Image (cartoon, rainbow, N blue to C red):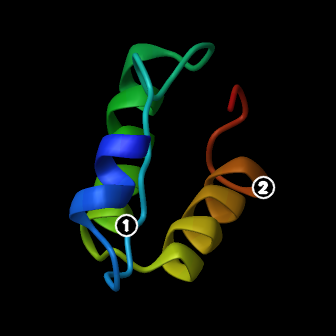
Amino acid sequence: MEALSQVLPGHNVLLIASSDLSHYPSYDDAVRVDAGTLAAIETLDSQQLRQTVVEEMTQGCPTC
C-alpha cells in the first residue's frame, strides 16, 4: 500500500484484489457474473461496480 500511495498521489484509484471473483455459483453463473463485474471494474466507477454487484446478488444469480 505504501508503494502505491507514493506513485499515485492526486489520482483517483479503485483498487480491487481477489484470488477469484466467485466462490459458490455454478460455472455458467460465475462466468456471467464475473464478466459483468470485470466490465464494471474496468469503468473505474465505484458506484457502477457497487450497482453491478447489488444487481447480481438480488437477481439472476440464485447462488451468488
Say whether residue 30 is left or right of residue 63: left
State whether residue 35 appears in this view.
no
Mark 1 residue type: Ala
Return the residue at label 2.
Answer: 58
Query: In whole angstroms, how far apart are the C-alphas of marks 1 and 2?
Result: 17 Å
Q: Establish if 35 lies above or below 36.
A: above
- In front here: 39 or 12? 12
Image x and y of residue 55, in percent? 66, 64
Q: Is residue 33 above or below residue 14?
A: above
Residue where numbered disc 1 is placed: 40
Which residue sits at x=57%, y=20%?
A: 25
Query: Front-most of 11 and 9?
Result: 9
Mark 1, residues whose alpha carbon is within 10 Å: few (<14), some, or many (≥20)?
Answer: some
Residue at 30% of width from left, 58% of height from top? 6
> For the residue labelled by badge 2, is the local secondary structure a helix, a strand or a loop?
helix
Q: Quadrant of the N terminus?
A: top left
Amino acid under disc 2: Thr
For residue 7, what is the image quadrant? bottom left
Residue 20 on image: x %, y %: 40, 20
